[in-house]
Amino acid sequence: MTNNNNHVKIFDTTLRDGEQAPGFSMAIDAKLTVARALQNLNVDIIEAGFAAASPGDAAAVRAVAEEIEGPIICSLSRLNESDIDASALAIEPAKSRRIHTFIGTSPTHRVAKLKMTEEEILKKISETVAYARSACDNIEFSPEDAIRTERAFLVEAVEAAIEAGATTINIPDTVGYTTPEEITDLFSFLCSTVKDAQKVTFSAHCHDDLGMAVANSLAAVRGGARQIECAINGIGERAGNCSLEEAVMALHTRKDHFGVETQIDTTNIFAASQALARVTHNPIPRNKAIVGRNAFAHEAGIHQHGVLADKRTYEIMDAEAVGMPSNSIVLGKHSGKHALAARITSLGFEVTPERVGEIFIMFKALADTTREVTDADIVRLVTGANDDGRSGPWRVRRVELRAEIEDETPPFARITMEHDGGERRTVTSEGEGPIDAAFAAVCAISDVKGHIVSLDLHHIAAEGVVRAEAIVAVEEKRFTGVSQEVDVADAAVSAFVAAINQAAAMAGAREQIAGAA
Ligand code: KIV
Ligand code: ZN
């Protein structure tokens, strides 16, 4: 172990600090799904939970330890023997294990929370870290609230832990209070002052209360930290932890600046972020760095022109580098003729520049009334079909949903839809719930094999309506349907139909082109 090498370990705490946050609690299956994504990312350490917190968390840590290979599996413990015993037992099946133990060291923690003197805390560190070391040879010690701890006492606490056998010293900014300059200085100070500093890895654990967790973690690396504690999508206590994807991509993209590397397989970042959002039911904001839907999307005409000529004009990373399906050009009111022409060609149409000019006028008029112009809108503008506002051949005529709560009857939906050609079809489907059943019925009626990727519903109390956005995957392509209805079920079904209609419209346009050729 050394602080001088250029490998920065990624210690992922999504399953511990991350899942402690309200709204992010995960049962065993959910934790295993995320742990598999972390294994694919090739993180160095997975903090799988806090074994002493509950029997369920102990079982989850054990399940991760039994299945996951590669990363070191770690469990958190307060600085006492029974917590350490619980951690040791839970991580026992893992090939590589770590126990992480902590105690508050700042004046507020000592006086208000622990009611212990500095001497008592130092004694506890010496005795209990040694106890942990007798159970596991990989021990991480954290002086909680290190940032607000007096430097002299922090050095004493850290030296006591190293002497007792700690192998990693984590310096938490528990309350997200520090700044980049301050934390660089603190790590440089600790690395050069602490006795036997070269025997351990120094680690940063930054919270995002002032929005500086990533900047502070990177600044800690500049000061000598060689482990960053972080979480997927930046989840964690209060405003969250340092976001794994942001810290890793910053180190990766600006290797020229930081001069260090991680072992993360960045192409699995998007999948990990999606898996976490799915199992915790917390959607990722569109503008989230690295993993948000807009992170690699361009709508402004000047940007689109530049990106079409050479991606590097407005992109510092490739979407593929983080495993994100390419969505770079989003057509909207800021888009220009170059982007429109490129999309028309990619949809399989051959049109003259004069025709592109005519379509561009209609496109701008449409773009002024909608957030995003979809591929189906483009098909409609090119073919001139369906000018009643629908993007596709299907119209919903009747929706009947049945949800049973204390009944054995499975939920079902009966949907009637009418095709522009005049055909009317009614299908009844069962599903996990009535909405799921309705989606199945819509697919059966339209002969489009779609599956729902995401469904966002927002109740706008002031307007008394529900806005729905459904993203539906059909083969390799994704379609976005939006709707606004008074009822939540109607909104969900209408958004799904809007997306399915787009897929049907595109399939129809392709058939027309093939027939004409
Ligand atoms: O924020 C914090 O101080 C922690 C410790 C347990 C490391 O999460
Ligand atoms: Zn924390």
Image: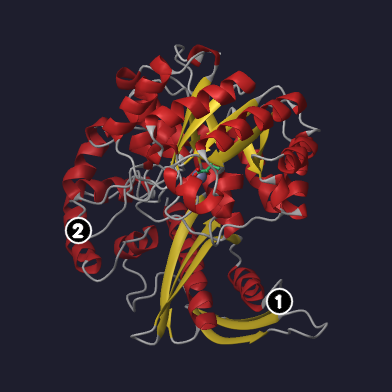
Q: Is residue 72 visible?
A: no
Residue type, mark 1 in image: Ser
Q: Is mark 1 within 8 Å of ligand 2?
A: no
Which badge, 1 or 2, is on the more N-terminal residue? 2
Residue 305 sits in quarter: top left
Q: Is residue 28 visible?
A: yes
Give me the C-alpha separation between circle 1 and circle 2. 42 Å
The residue under label 2 is 360
In the displayed structure, 169 sits above or below 144; it is above
Q: Are marks 1 and 2 in contact (CB under 8 Å)?
A: no
What residue sits 73% from the left and 29% below the top? 131
Question: In the image, 422: left or right of 64?
Answer: left
Question: In the image, 140: left or right of 182?
Answer: right
Q: Residues within 10 Å of mark 1 (few under 14, many from 20)?
A: many
Residue 302 sits in quarter: top left
Question: In the image, 483: left or right of 61?
Answer: left
Q: In which quadrant of the rendered image does the N terminus lie?
A: top right
Instruction: Pinpoint residue 347: horizontal percent, then vertical percent.
Output: 38, 50
Q: Residue most toward the right?
A: 408
Instruction: Pinpoint residue 463: horizontal percent, then vertical percent.
Output: 34, 86
What residue sits 55% from the left and 62% below the top? 23
Q: Residues within 10 Å of mark 2 (few under 14, many from 20)?
A: many
Instruction: Pinpoint residue 469: horizontal percent, then vertical percent.
Output: 44, 68
What residue sits 16% from the left and 53% below the top? 354
Which is more foreground, mark 1 or mark 2? 1
The residue under label 1 is 429
Check disc 2 and report its element: helix, strand or loop. helix
In the displayed structure, 365 sits above or below 350; it is below
Instruction: Pinpoint residue 449: horizontal percent, then vertical percent.
Output: 61, 60
Depth check, front residue: 502 or 46: 46
As drawn, the label of residue 13 is none
